C-alpha cells in the first residue's frame, strides 16, 4: 500500500460535535476498540506510540499519513495508534482506519486515562482532578500519556503530525527531537538503558 492510497481515502464526514477542552469522552466505554495490551508491549522494546486525545474519534488524512509512514519504515516494529476517547465501529471498519489496519504491524487500541495513571506517581492527577483544571486538557493528556508509556514499556513516541522518512534504528537507544535549538517531546525514544530509565523516571516522578 502506498501513501497515496491512505491520503486519498474518503472519510465519513464531520464527527459528532464536541466541546473544546471537554474530556468527558475519556470516561466513555468503547466496544469497538480493544483495550491496549500491556503484556504484549512489555515483551518488546520495538514499540512506536501515537496518541489521539481530542475525542473526535477518527484521524484526518495528515494523521493517517503519519501512522502509515511509521509502519512502512519499521516493518519489524509494532506501531500503536492509541485513542483516549471512543471510536465507533463504522469509523473503525471503513475509510482511513480500515486502511491502516491492512498493515500487520499497526495496532489500533483504546487507552483509558484512569488505567494508564493507575499505580503510578501521576495517579494523583486523577484523584485530585487536576487535569480538569487545565486550560489545555487535550495537550496535557497527550504529554502525560506519552511519558507514562515510555516509562512503562519503552519505545518511541511520535506526534500525529510527523511523517517518518528514515527508520528510528539509526538514532541510537535514547533520543529526542530538536526544534529551533530546543529539545521537544514531539518525537522521542527511551530504552531500558541507564540513561533511558533515568530520563523516564525523572519525567514521571
Image (cartoon, rainbow, N blue to C red):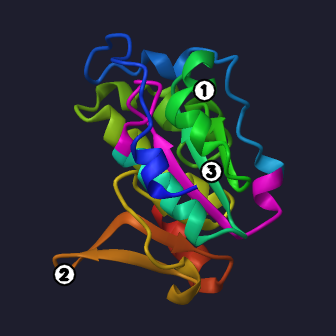
Q: Which sits earlier in the primary sequence, circle 2 or circle 1? A: 1
In this view, the residue farthest toward the top is 17
Work out whether 77 lies above or below 182.
above
- Residue 33: percent from the left, percent from the top? 68, 27
Magenta stretch containing residue 4, yes or no?
A: no
Residue 80's disc is: 3
Pointers 2 and 1 in contact (C-beta within 8 Å): no
Work out whether 54 lies above or below 164.
above
Helix, strand or loop at mark 1? helix
Residue toward you, 130 or 55: 55
Residue toward you, 194 or 52: 52
The residue wearing badge 2 is: 181
Helix, strand or loop at mark 3? strand
Pointers 3 and 1 in contact (C-beta within 8 Å): no
Which segment is the magenta one? 40-61
Work out whether 130 lies above or below 39.
above
33 left or right of 15 in image: right
- Residue 178: percent from the left, percent from the top? 29, 77
Q: Nearer the viewer, mark 3 or mark 2?
A: 3
115 left or right of 18 in image: right
Q: Nearer the viewer, mark 3 or mark 1?
A: 1
Q: Quadrant of residue 138?
A: top left
Residue 92's disc is: 1
Amino acid at each position: 500500500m502506498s501513501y497515496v492510497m491512505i491520503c486519498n481515502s474518503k472519510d465519513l464526514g464531520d464527527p459528532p460535535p464536541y466541546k473544546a477542552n471537554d474530556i468527558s469522552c475519556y470516561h466513555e466505554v468503547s466496544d469497538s476498540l480493544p483495550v491496549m495490551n500491556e503484556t504484549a508491549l512489555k515483551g518488546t522494546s520495538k514499540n512506536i506510540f501515537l496518541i489521539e486525545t481530542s475525542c473526535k474519534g477518527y484521524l484526518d488524512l495528515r494523521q493517517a499519513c503519519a501512522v502509515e509512514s511509521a509502519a512502512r519504515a519499521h516493518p519489524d516494529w509494532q506501531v500503536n495508534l492509541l485513542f483516549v476517547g471512543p471510536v465507533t465501529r463504522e469509523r473503525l471498519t471503513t475509510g482511513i482506519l480500515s486502511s491502516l489496519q491492512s498493515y500487520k504491524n499497526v495496532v489500533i487500541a483504546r487507552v483509558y486515562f484512569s488505567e494508564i495513571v493507575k499505580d503510578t506517581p501521576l495517579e494523583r492527577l486523577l484523584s485530585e482532578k487536576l487535569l480538569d483544571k487545565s486550560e489545555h486538557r487535550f495537550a496535557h493528556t497527550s504529554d502525560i500519556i506519552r511519558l507514562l508509556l515510555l516509562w512503562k514499556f519503552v519505545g518511541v513516541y511520535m506526534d500525529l503530525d510527523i511523517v517518518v522518512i528514515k527508520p528510528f534504528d539509526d538514532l541510537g537507544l535514547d533520543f529526542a527531537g530538536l526544534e529551533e535549538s530546543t529539545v521537544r517531546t514531539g518525537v522521542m525514544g527511551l530504552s531500558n538503558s541507564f540513561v533511558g530509565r533515568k530520563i523516564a523516571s525523572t519525567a514521571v516522578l
